[in-house]
Image (tube, grey):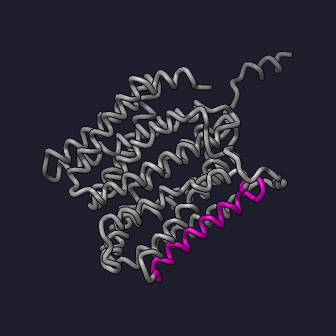
Amino acid sequence: MDNLSTDRSQPAVRPRLWSKNLWMVCLSHLLLGTALYMLIPALPAWLVERYEATPIEVGGALAVSSIVAFLLGPFFNYLVDRFPRKSVCTWALFGISLCSLGFFRAPVLAWIFTLRILQGLLQGVALMASGSTLAIDLTTSPNRTNANNAFAWFGRLSLSIGPLMGLLVQYLIGFRAVFAVSCALALVACLCILCLKVPFRAPLDPPKFSLDRFWLPNGWLMFFQTIPIAVVTGILLADIQRYEFYVFMMVGFCIALLALRFVFLEADIRSEIVSGNILWGAGLLLLLFREGTSAFYASSILIGIGIGLTTARLLVFFIKLSHHCERGSANTSFMFAWELGLGIGLFLGYTLPTAADGYRISLWILAIAMVLYLTFTHRWFMAHKMR
């Protein structure tokens, strides 16, 4: 009896988050993001040099991949229930690598657009199969929110690593090497998924068309709250072609991670959005009104902190708006909003006359997004959250 009482008094041991499976899924996401984002600074110069592309054609070629990424969304549930989820993700990543390799041989600009569309569609399938399915299925229930956050952070880091690698490879070796490295990284991401140990699951026969694992009905307003944030990120990725920006943006990401762990852990849930937007706006103001190396480095760090804080909180909002069985739909809805906004931002960034115009528009977008959040979205969230 005494032993039973002692056992019950001991606190429950929380299952370990970082398994080999989760590491492989997150590393695959990092490699996939790096493989795609490294094309952003390199592809425009290639298009102008080889095809004499106009700014609108360049912006369109970059944006179309993100804009179409989730067009196959209604078929996601069928794909991962009818076929092995590991295989779905593996083949999608393999297809992305082939598209990167295909840029070598594209005879006309229309082929580039076709390859970018295929790359975007396969990216959506890979993100859904890995982040909204495998990362959740291979993680114990108490750790699934943390697994979603970890998966998202590895993708966020690729926002800085990808363009940085693209600029360095282009400068040191040349355009063609960027496509080869992108192909190689996607293949390594594919190998990471092949290393997963996924329990056998009998195939089902779900309906071919379904919004399950794709769209969170309860998160529609948060979807539109996320798009402007991604638009601003896309504008910056298109406008800034200096490797120092991405180095110091990565520093900002690391500071944001530490702040989320030690500063905002018990803070009001609005604090990350408000603080992130303010710091992000301060970074844009420095880009607009201050010249010099120190100001540029400081602005890069502030922008990194702002992106990290804001997007991390938006993902948590999506998860809290979902029922337990809708976690995959919440994750995919967030990624859908992010990719759509990113594509719009990339197009704007390459078609606006000057980078300063992009910074001014970004400031207005951030200001409007924060006003919308504080005056309406936050109250709506508190009334509709499920957790």
What range of the chain is rendered magenta? Answer: 79-106
Q: Residue 88 colored magenta?
A: yes
Residue at image position (29%, 37%) is 279
Relative to 171, residue 73 above or below:
above
Give percent across and percent down for residue 103.
46, 77
Residue at image position (78%, 53%) is 199
Give percent across and percent down for residue 183.
51, 72
Q: Is residue 126 left or right of residue 169?
A: right
Q: Nearer the viewer, residue 58 or 251?
A: 58
Q: Using the rendered image of the protein, determine whether residue 180 is visible from the camera's viewpoint.
A: no
Q: Quadrant of the N terminus?
A: top right
Q: Nearer the viewer, residue 304 or 385?
A: 385
Q: Using the rendered image of the protein, determine whether residue 378 is visible from the camera's viewpoint.
A: yes
Q: Nearer the viewer, residue 74 or 186?
A: 74
Residue at image position (50%, 33%) is 221
Q: Quadrant of the C terminus?
A: top right
